[in-house]
Image (tube, helix red, strand yellow):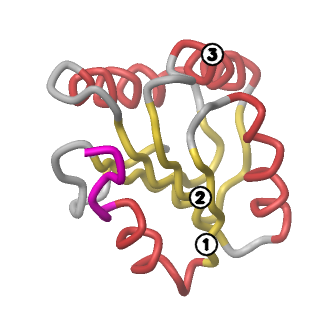
Amino acid sequence: MIEILSRSAENVLGFRMTGKLHDEDYKHFVPTVDAVLTEHEKVRLLGWFDDFHGWDLHALWDDIKFATTHCTKADRIALVGDKKWEEWMAKVCKPFTLATIRYFDVEEIDSAWAWLEEPSQDG
């Protein structure tokens, strides 16, 4: 399941991902991001992996499509989790986006939000 986090505001969106993701999750997630992009040139994303079990095949394809169609539309992505593989995944994702990606342990989620909420350097 993908759940939007209440701290989301303006062009900073946070999502909590739990269990195994399915196609239906992306039918809500992608339009939420796209709606923000109608108002803002770039989006900043927080992905919190909480008891996350990966993707089914269709959702994996949805994730790949999202990454390729939105690769220039995010300038910062914070990945939050408590497993070493999630930190590894942050490194694997880097070639698929122009965004700056940082990994934060779950205890550092407030720092992840603060990093995303910092004013932009380019104006």
Which of the two labelled residues, at mark 1 and mark 2, occupies the earlier sequence position?
2
Q: Secondary structure at mark 1?
A: strand
Q: What residue is pinned by disc 3?
A: 68
Residue drawn at point x = 21 percent, y = 29 percent: 40
Residue drawn at point x = 65 percent, y = 65 percent: 103
Q: Is residue 23 magenta?
A: no
Mark number for residue 104? 1
Compare residues 59 and 84 and report the one nearer the observer.
Answer: 84
Dominant secondary structure, magenta: loop
Residue drawn at point x = 47 percent, y = 30 percent: 25
Q: Position of residue 108 (x, y in %)?
A: 52, 83
Q: Which residues are magenta?
A: 117-123
Residue type of the residue flagged with mark 2: Leu
Q: Position of residue 46 (x, y in %)?
A: 45, 54
Residue type of the residue flagged with mark 1: Phe
Residue drawn at point x = 84 percent, y = 57 percent: 88
Q: What residue is pinned by disc 2?
A: 79
Which of the two labelled residues, at mark 3 and mark 2, occupies the earlier sequence position?
3
Image position of 58 with respect to 55: above or below: above
Q: Secondary structure at mark 2?
A: strand
Residue type of the residue flagged with mark 3: Thr
- Given contact means CB atoms under 8 Å apart, are the residues at marks 3 and 1 in contact? no
| For residue 94, side relative to residue 14 (left or right) | right
Q: CA distance from mark 3 to mark 2?
A: 18 Å
Q: Position of residue 107 (x, y in %)?
A: 55, 86
Q: Using a 10 Å C-alpha cutoff, classify the residue at mark 2 as few (fewer than 14 neighbours), some (14 to 19) or many (20 or more).
A: many
Q: CA distance from mark 1 to mark 2?
A: 6 Å
